[in-house]
Every structure is written in structure tokens, then in C-alpha cells.
Amino acid sequence: MTTAQPLDVTPTPLALLLLGREADPRSERGVECPGDLPSPSDPDLVERARAAKEKLGDSVFVLGHHYQRDEVIQFADVTGDSFKLARDAAARPEAEYIVFCGVHFMAESADILTTDAQAVVLPDLAAGCSMADMATAEQVAECWDVLTDAGVADQVVPVSYMNSSADIKAFTGKHGGTICTSSNAKRALEWAFEQGEKILFLPDQHLGRNTAVRDMGMSLEDCVVYNPHKPNGGLTAEQLRDARMILWRGHCSVHGRFSVESVEDVRARIPGVNVLVHPECKHEVVAAADYVGSTEYIIKALEAAPRGSKWAIGTELNLVRRLANRFADEDKEIVFLDKTVCFCSTMNRIDLPHLVWTLESLADGKLVNRIEVDPETEKYAKLALERMLALP
């Protein structure tokens, strides 16, 4: 009988991070909250949050993303999607503190667009984004080397989704590209194709594919998927030369779970239902839906929907539940597309205890959980964002 020998394996930095044995403050995963949080069962949390916010007055501006819990949203001065909120923050230069109830990349965008005199605060630094985590600066730099070796880099224009880290936005700005949202992705791609022959779309493959094929009439064969975990992205130089859309292998953990089976099931259960999904869903789900659009589009569509209509929504559950309650008195039946309940786990890290701790700390003159983008990264990330703002 032989004795098994220990494997000589050195864990990678990413593996150590996932195991909780390392911390990377530049990562979307963030780091642990340094403060002592109030108990989530404290019945006085709502009053404590209200009192701290009142004490801070106009010096604080609280932003609430649509996917946040109701307990947090009630304290938001404005609600919206990530880019709308970042712009709202920039429009309030008198606010000393911007408390962003969202995730890390959103707070970074707010810091980029606000003044140096303002401090952007994220109530829980571990509120990241799995999609944004799927594209690191090192991986994207390596991808560009692969494109260069294939002889196509000079034809490629990067387009990065708003749901990306500041580092990825900076890479995009430095290489002549632009940022897009789910609302203006088609305009961004049209602009990019005026600048070059190919697009590197980061980091959500589904939004890139759906925009190219559904909205711009391209074929699935025009798209290839670059996998950063495979040599050369798992693609040949010929595939890169033939492709028009080079899609990064990333996705949203919530929107990626919806399936064609979900659509078929809800149609069988609710006759006459309208299926409305976000473009971060898989291409086959988007093709099976009746309507497709951004978070803001979804809200407006339900506002305009006739009384008594039925809707199955493929987006984050906090928003779907809030909309169902909002329109219940209009007899609009609004259900979550999937039978399995699924919140965005990282969005849900921003809860009432974290918000209370943040507001009370600020009210006591203690700045916590500040999100700061370094000047060099901010310079190029802002350039990419400005290109988006200049889109017709």
C-alpha cells in the first residue's frame, strides 16, 4: 500500500480571496465591515435611521437602487438604476456625504462623477457584483494581448457595461471605447462600429449578444465568447478575425437563472400573461419573451399597463415584489418569472443595520466605508463615461 503524497499546489490569489484567507479592497467582493452593527432584531432601527438622517440634514444624500430591500428604500432620497443614481449624486454638489445603497461598482461610478469634496459611502463594503467580478483588469489586459497577437486589436473598440469596475471602465476609456447602460446599449454599439470593425463587449455576454442580434440584426455567428479562464480565451486567431462581437464570458447571477422553461411554465399557469424580461437574460429567454427592456423600461411598462393585465417579470425579486404591491389596487397581476425565489445576494447585503450604522457614524463625525477611485483610474473611466454621455 502506498502513502498518498501531498500535492504541491500553490493557491492562486483569487482562490485565497474566495476562501476568505485574503482581502482585496479593489475587488468587487470588498472587505468586511469594520464596525459593530446594531442587532437586526432591534425594533428601534427605523427610528434610529430617521433620527440620524434628520441630524445630518442636507449634508447627506441617500441613493437607493431599485433592487434594494424596502426597509432600505424607505430612506432613499432618490431611487433608480446605477447610472441614474450616479448622475443624481453629481447633481447634488452641496451634499457632503453620498450614501449609496447599491453595490461597489455603483459607488465607484458615483465617486468618479462627484466632486473631490464629496465622500461616497457604501454601507457594506462586501456588497459587490458577481458580474463585475467576472472581468478583472489583469484578465482584460491579457485579452487585449491576445487580440494584438491575432492582428485585430487595432480594429476593436471596447464597450463596457455600466456594471463593471472602475478599472474596466478606465481600460475602456484608455482604448477609445465607451460605457453603456441596458437602455442605451444599441446606441453605444452603433457608435463603436463607426469607430472600428469589431467590439469587445464587457462584462455581460447576454446584454452584448441580445443587443447585437435582437436590436441590430446581427447573427449569432457574428458573436464569439472570450473565456478568460482558457488559453487565448478559448478562441483561435481565425475566430477572432471573423467575429464582429467579441463577448466577455460574464453574466448576472440573478438574470442568468431565468430559462425558457420558466417562460413556458408561467404561460401555462397564467393564461394571457405578458412576459417582460431584462436584456441581461439569456438570448433564448429574451427571444421567448413578449417585451424586453431595462429596469426603468420595466417600471414604465407596468405604469402604462391597462388595469387587470397580467405580467411575469424577469428581473430582481425586490423590485418585482415592490411593483406587485404598488399596482395591486389597479388589479394588475405581477409575478416573478421563476418559481424559485431569488434575490440579488450582494444587493441584499445593504440592510437596515448597515444603513443605521453608516448614518449614525456620519452623524457622529466619523467617515466610514468611503469609496475612492484613484486619480489615474478616474481620469480614463470618466473619459469613457463622457463618451457615453455624448452619444446622440
Image: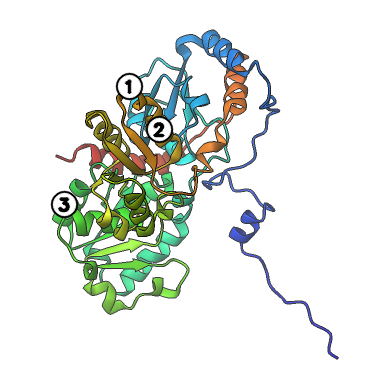
| Helix, strand or loop under label 2 | loop
Which residue bears the numbered disc 1? 91
- Crowding near the residue tagged with mark 2, few <14, some 14–19, many ≥20 C-alpha atoms within 10 Å: many
- The N terminus appears in which quarter of the rendering? bottom right
Residue visible at 62% across and 42% down in the picture: 31
Going by the numbered disc 3, the residue's amino acid type is Glu
Instruction: Identify which amino acid the numbered label 2 is placed on.
Output: His
Q: Which mark is residue 190?
A: 3
x and y, in percent, of residue 247 in the image:
32, 62
x, y (%) of residue 331?
31, 28
**Residue at the image position 59 percent from the left and 59 percent from the top:** 14
> Which residue is the site of mark 2?
66
Residue 245 appears at what percent x and percent y?
A: 25, 63
Q: Residue at x 33, y 39 (%)?
A: 382
Image quadrant assignment for residue 82: top left
Q: Is residue 117 visible?
A: no
Q: Which mark is first along the chain, 2 or 1?
A: 2
Relative to residue 254, is residue 385 drawn left or right?
left
Q: How far apart in space, not on screen, are marks 2 and 3 (Cα)?
A: 28 Å
- Using the image as rendered, state which of residue 370 and residue 186 is in the foreground: 186
In the picture, residue 319 is in which quadrant?
Answer: top left
For numbered disc 1, what is the local secondary structure? loop
Q: Residue 133 in the image: x percent, y percent?
A: 48, 52
Colour mapping used in the image: rainbow
Question: Within 10 angstroms of label 3, few (less than 14), some, or many (20 or more) residues?
Answer: few
